[in-house]
């Protein structure tokens, strides 16, 4: 079984969370023999109000979370009050020490950095937060041109929509290229930006 | 003011709705002088359980919806019980007759077809539903290779992730290419599928 948790907190950027959710839950639902479970984990009780106002009911709270193989930390303006938050640092640190693969989308990387998880590592974030990332931890080797950075136990993605690409990479890493291609086909991810 | 409604019903595919939501609500929040409001409209009261299990609280129900300039009808397995549903047909028909720009993502086009809105028109849908679309209305000119089809008062997109591209097109249509480029940059939509 591969258990994946997507963290939700007030101010989570919607697509940061739902891009990976779509990819990973499509994998889970479409290929049940792969044994994947994806859960939306609320930092607090009750509905989460995302950055643009969408309200989501998490499946469980962090206090109820089972052991996780992968955690996804999304970004959004809700990360700002969580930088320096001791509870968040402890939460992320505990997961990382237990062997959970720690991943972030967009400014979610600020929270990984703040928890000390990116020290001396290559990483990326939203283009507007690159300076903030090194301000938190100057030892981070920032990679502004990478769509996502896989550094083994830590994977960070660039802004918002990059979570879709990172999530497909996680499918590659856990189930291989062919499965990831099948998931990509299911969500018809043949992007063609009109401008 | 441009008022946009995204319809939510049980079984809505998550990214079908949240892809356009992210693009359009980023436009709304980032450029308030453009006068754009985006609302999540529930077909029923209370939380909506999406196709992969994410639960969303809509802002309002269809009965409370204001006059809309644009409606987005997402797809997902929840469209299946709504094909043939007289209430849905009436709802979509009323919007269309009042001049609302009717748009769909993925199998949302099946509901537009079922309401008679695609008769004699070019349209697209998820690759797995192309036959279903013409089974509902054989006069539809199906365009399997188009990412989205803009036929004036009706715009249809192909599967799931195509809603992001279609929503950027809507920004172009209502506010021009430069604004759409700015929204695209905000969500860092420089897709790079890893497989």
Image (cartoon, coloured by chain):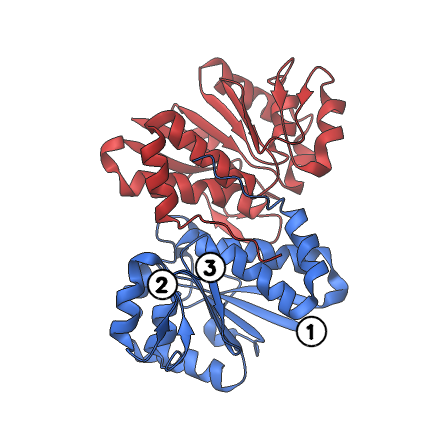
Chain colours: A red, B blue
Closer to the N terminus: mark 2 or mark 3? 2
Q: Is residue A92 above or below residue B64?
A: above
Q: Residues within 10 Å of mark 3 (few under 14, many from 20)?
A: many
Instruction: Give me the residue at 53% from left, 61% from top.
Output: B166
> To which residue does mark 2 refer?
B107
Tell me the residue that label 1 is attached to.
B1
Q: CA distance from mark 1 to mark 3?
A: 28 Å
Disc 3 chain ID: B
Tell me if mark 2 has few (under 14), some (14-19) or many (20+) residues whose alpha carbon lies within 10 angstroms of its own. many
Chain hosting mark 1:
B
Q: Residue A26 in the image: state x and y as whole percent.
A: 35, 43
Residues under labels 2 and 3: Cα distance?
13 Å
Relative placement, left or right, of A140 versus A13 is right
Q: Earlier in the sequence, mark 1 or mark 2?
A: 1
> Residue at 35% across / 42% down in the picture?
A183
Q: Kindly check if marks 2 and 3 are in contact, taking CB atoms under 8 A apart as contact.
A: no
Residue B99 lies, in percent from the top left, at 54, 83
Image position of B90 with respect to A64: above or below: below
For label 1, the SS is: loop
* C-alpha span from label 1 to label 2: 29 Å
Chain at numbered mark 2: B
Q: Position of residue B143 (x, y in %)?
A: 39, 67
SS state under label 2: loop
């Amino acid at each position: 079984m591969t258990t994946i948790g997507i963290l939700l907190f007030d101010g989570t950027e919607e697509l940061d969370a739902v891009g990976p959710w779509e990819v990973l839950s499509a994998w889970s639902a479409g290929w049940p023999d792969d044994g994947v479970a994806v859960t939306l984990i609320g930092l607090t009780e009750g509905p989460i109000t995302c950055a643009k106002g969408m309200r989501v009911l998490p499946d469980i709270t962090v206090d109820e979370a089972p052991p996780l193989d992968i955690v996804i930390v999304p970004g959004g303006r809700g990360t700002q009050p969580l930088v320096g938050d001791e509870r968040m640092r402890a939460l992320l640190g505990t997961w990382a020490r237990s062997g959970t693969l720690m991943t972030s989308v967009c400014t979610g990387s600020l929270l990984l950095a703040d928890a000390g998880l990116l020290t001396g590592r290559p990483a990326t974030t939203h283009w507007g937060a690159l300076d903030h990332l090194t301000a938190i931890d100057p030892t981070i080797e920032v990679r502004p041109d990478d769509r996502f950075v896989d550094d083994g136990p830590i994977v960070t993605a660039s802004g918002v929509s990059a979570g879709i690409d990172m999530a497909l990479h996680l499918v590659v890493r856990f189930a291989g290229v062919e499965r990831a291609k099948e998931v990509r086909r299911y969500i018809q991810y043949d992007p063609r930006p009109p401008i």
